[in-house]
Amino acid sequence: MEQTEQYKLVMSEIIAKQSLVFGHDVAIMRAKKISEIIVSGDGVVTEINGDPVEALKKLIDTYIHPSVQIVAMIESMTDGVFMADSEYNVVSANPAARKILGSGVESIPTIVHIVDILKGVLDIKSKIEEAIKLDKVLSFYGVLLNKQYYKVIVCPVKSSTNITKSEILGVSVVFHDVTHEKEAEMMRNDFTSLMVHELRSPLGNIKKIGELMKSSKILDDKQARAEYVSMLYESASSMLDLVNDLLDVAKLDAGKFYIDKQQINLKEVLQSSVKFFETTAMDAGVNVALRIADGVPSVVQADAKRITQVVNNLLSNGINYTLRGGKVTLECFIHKQGFEISEEARKFELPWAPDDVVSKVATSEIGDSIVVAVTDTGEGISASNIEKLFDKFTQFASSALQSGHKVTGLGLVIVKGIVDAHGGSVGVVSKQGKGSTFYFTLPL
Amino acid sequence: MIKKILIIDDDKIFTKILRDGLVAGGQGKYEVFTAFDGEAGLEIAKLEKPDLVMLDMLMPKVSGIEFLKKLRREEWGKEVPVIVETQLSDLEKMSEGIALGVRGYIIKSDYSIEAILRQVDDILK
């Protein structure tokens, strides 16, 4: 009697657990099947133990726990997966698949619903047919569904792992989210087309100048001829600069970017950079100033050519993005570990952009260094763009294109590469409409 | 009567070639002003009230689209014809420009001064 009660208890427990996963009908059916095995005294169960309750527990351990675990695993997967039988009936779908296919959390989507959702994107019915017929795994990359990209894998489901005995029961269809990868790929394409555009403009000009110079009219006028020759020179130089930038980035990517550290006079480097931009700044109506705080050593260990490249890049950006009447300051001071660089700039009464948006650099942790910074009164950078500035140049390029602003090319990626090679850090603080400060440190 | 043309483009060399081409090809019909960014372009436009603007879309400071929006807000700027300088790959992004009354476009990588002159003559006649 007691055994019967215990038996009922365990049985109802099984039904409860099973119905959670497979639904009530299936659970009842399985429970009946188990009862039959026990009652008939058939198979392994009674051999192990005459006690039906013990036998039942053994049964649960052997047959039900593993399947419950597999089901739990599939249910918890972030990839969507559904199974269709060879008649195209969808027999099960995990919550992720129901979400991706938009069939509602409760119900398993029908094949009609799935075909409809994938219409124009993927002919799922014929792919299922193909996978079953050829007994082959099919894979489709970049299937667009509700603004997300998926890799869809259609895989035949077999009755057993034994190849000779197995029979194809249907297919499993997996939806793996590849939105991130796909976006990165599109950014790379955007970047490539931007670079091609940047190379094509000066090349187009060179061709046009050649055409114009071929017609004798311009060659007659001495002044015009000189102008056109210097335009040829400028166009070729800007192409060469860009090609060199591309090569630098390729070196950075390949980890083959080297610097040549020498004893250099940093103040002189900064002075000549400011001088270099005098005319450009004047044309743009932007005031450029150099401010070097007390205590900066006159000689430092660095690659003069590369540091000039960094400073020129930051100055050029500053001037480009500052409106007429604005101000760009190149500044240099000493940083001591344990202090915030922005605070130190204020202490030296040097301009520093309001730091509403800060790239994630804990400046107080940076060891004793020389800080070189360019502060402008330009348009500032939005929080979403600031994170992309130095690392994911592709993304910034694309967002800059969308907003209609010309990108300054690969500059900042190279800036970071050069500063990294010197063992320093780069950072930005900015406030939209107020201006930005780009800075880098050189360890002392 | 001499017509005023304003070229706004940060590509100084392209601007110079275009300017020389319009001055020489226009045979005295056109007076050409140039600006290298949208901000300077707006100032010159306000001052000179050009009869035609040739506008680069991709510029620092004030972009082409921003310039167009500002131009159309001005009483005198509502009807000024605008030719946009662009790249073939950006043509799909032109719908916004068309909504702002862009009259024509130049493909920058593949332009001929003669074709541009014809386009300009056609708009300004």
Image: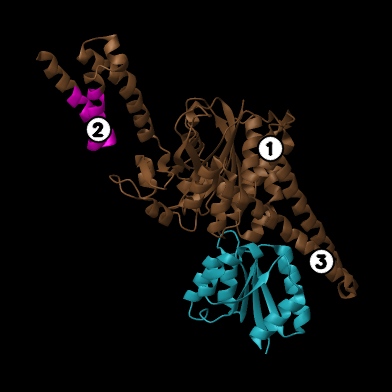
Chain colours: A brown, B cyan
Rendering coords of residue B100 (x, y %): 51, 74
The chain to which mark 3 is attached is A
Q: Is residue A367 something that shows in the picture?
A: yes
The span picked out in magenta is A11-36
A310 versus A10 height, above or below: below
Do the residues marked 1 and 2 share a common chain?
yes
Amino acid carrying mark 2 in the image: Met
Rendering coords of residue B98 (x, y %): 54, 74
Amino acid carrying mark 1 in the image: Ile
Question: Which tag is nearer the camera, tag 3 or tag 2?
Answer: 2
The mark found on residue A307 in the picture is 1
Horizontal side of residue A117 vs A237, given as left or right = left
Q: Residues within 10 Å of mark 2 (few under 14, many from 20)?
A: few
Q: Nearer the viewer, residue A326 or A210?
A: A210
Horizontal side of residue A412 vs A160, given as left or right = right
Name the residue: 21% across, 29% down.
Answer: A15
The mark found on residue A29 in the picture is 2
Do the residues marked 3 and 2 share a common chain?
yes
Q: Which mark is first along the chain, 2 or 3?
A: 2
Q: CA distance from mark 3 to mark 2?
A: 86 Å
Q: Is residue A20 magenta?
A: yes
Q: Secondary structure at mark 3?
A: helix
Q: Which residue is mark 3?
A: A209
Q: Residues within 10 Å of mark 3 (few under 14, many from 20)?
A: some
Amino acid carrying mark 3 in the image: Ile
Q: Which mark is first along the chain, 2 or 1?
A: 2
